[in-house]
């Protein structure tokens, strides 16, 4: 035996990962976005690729390099991210870590919005498509669909409800009151149809490793 033999148990599988923020333009110079660093999603894409899977990483703009052996598709808006996900199907699994902007501007101003002497402008927003829910109910639904949820209150209760609402198989929930954005560590709970598994506080790369092992077990139960 060899303890050094690499685990390539996901060979032949195609895994879709979304990561980073989306950026929604308001006018040619301004946008609506969020603080997602992309670290957790990139670490997951890398860990899954290391197990031999073909990984398509659909990413909003982030400041970290593309992981080795991962096909990266760069997008900016939620609508582009959804289109890229659907174009990448079929996939065996989809892991949605992206911090998708919940809204975009109802009308995109073609010229810079100027100050005037009256009231500040009112931003009219419309809801963006829900990528995780769309993939969960897709005609070409991956066998395993995983969501992430950043919560600040009643983390587990909200996450259990969110898993059912989205229609995904697993939901990885974390408490963002403690400043997870851009951090190296993460404390998460994995919720599936059988219950809640609380993972200890660990490096985002270790969360990625553990999730990759879970995914591999899902496909090859031992
Ligand atoms: N998500 C998505 N598309 C959206 C919004 C969210 O794919 N338009 C995905 C995220 O990538 C994540 C999961 O849904 O995997 C949960 O995101 P979250 O923002 O926690 O859920 P929301 O339904 O947007 O609820 P909330 O009002 O709490 O933001
Ligand atoms: Ca949201």
Image: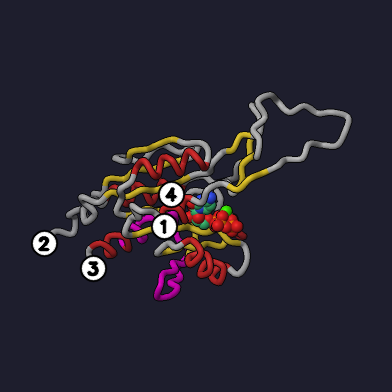
Q: Is mark 3 on a helix, strand or loop?
A: loop
Instruction: Give the CA separation, mark 1 to mark 3.
Output: 24 Å
Disc 2 C-beta below 8 A from ligand 1: no
Q: Quadrant of the C terminus?
A: bottom left
Q: Quadrant of the N terminus?
A: bottom left
Report the front residue among 170 and 103. Answer: 103
Label 4 Cα neighbours within 10 Å, binned few <14 / some 14-19 / many ≥20: many
- Say if residue 182 shows up in the picture: no
Instruction: Give the CA separation, mark 4 to mark 2.
Output: 33 Å
* Extent of the magenta region: 189-213
Q: Is mark 1 on a helix, strand or loop?
A: loop
Disc 4 C-beta below 8 A from ligand 1: no
Q: Are marks 1 and 2 in contact (CB under 8 Å)?
A: no
Q: Is residue 37 above or below residue 200?
A: above
Instruction: Give the CA separation, mark 1 to mark 2.
Output: 43 Å
Instruction: Give the CA separation, mark 4 to mark 1.
Output: 22 Å
Residue occupied by mark 4 = 41
* Comparing labels 1 and 3, the label whose residue is closer to the camera: 1
> Along the polypeptide, which appears first: circle 1 or circle 2?
2
> Along the polypeptide, which appears first: circle 1 or circle 3?
1
* Comparing labels 4 and 3, the label whose residue is closer to the camera: 3
Picture disc at residue 45: none
Residue occupied by mark 1 = 137
Residue occupied by mark 3 = 221
């Amino acid at each position: 035996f060899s303890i050094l033999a690499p685990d390539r148990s996901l060979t032949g599988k195609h895994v879709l990962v979304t990561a980073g923020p989306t950026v929604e333009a308001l006018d040619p110079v301004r946008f609506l976005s969020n603080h997602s660093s992309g670290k957790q999603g990139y670490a997951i894409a890398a860990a899954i690729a290391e197990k031999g899977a073909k990984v398509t990483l659909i990413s909003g703009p982030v400041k970290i390099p593309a992981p080795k052996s991962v096909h990266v598709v760069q997008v900016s808006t939620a609508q582009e991210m959804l289109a890229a996900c659907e174009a990448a199907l079929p996939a065996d699994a989809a892991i949605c870590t992206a911090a998708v902007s919940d809204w975009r501007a109802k009308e995109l101003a073609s010229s810079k919005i100027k100050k005037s002497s009256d009231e500040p402008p009112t931003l009219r927003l419309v809801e963006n498509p829900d990528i995780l829910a769309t993939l969960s109910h897709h005609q070409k639904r991956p066998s395993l669909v995983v969501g992430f949820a950043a919560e600040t209150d009643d983390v587990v209760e909200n996450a259990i409800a969110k898993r059912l609402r989205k229609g995904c198989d697993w939901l990885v929930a974390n408490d963002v009151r403690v400043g997870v954005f851009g951090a190296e560590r993460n404390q998460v709970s994995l919720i599936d149809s059988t219950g809640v598994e609380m993972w200890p506080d660990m490096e985002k790369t270790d969360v990625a490793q553990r999730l990759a092992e879970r995914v591999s077990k899902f496909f090859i139960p031992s």
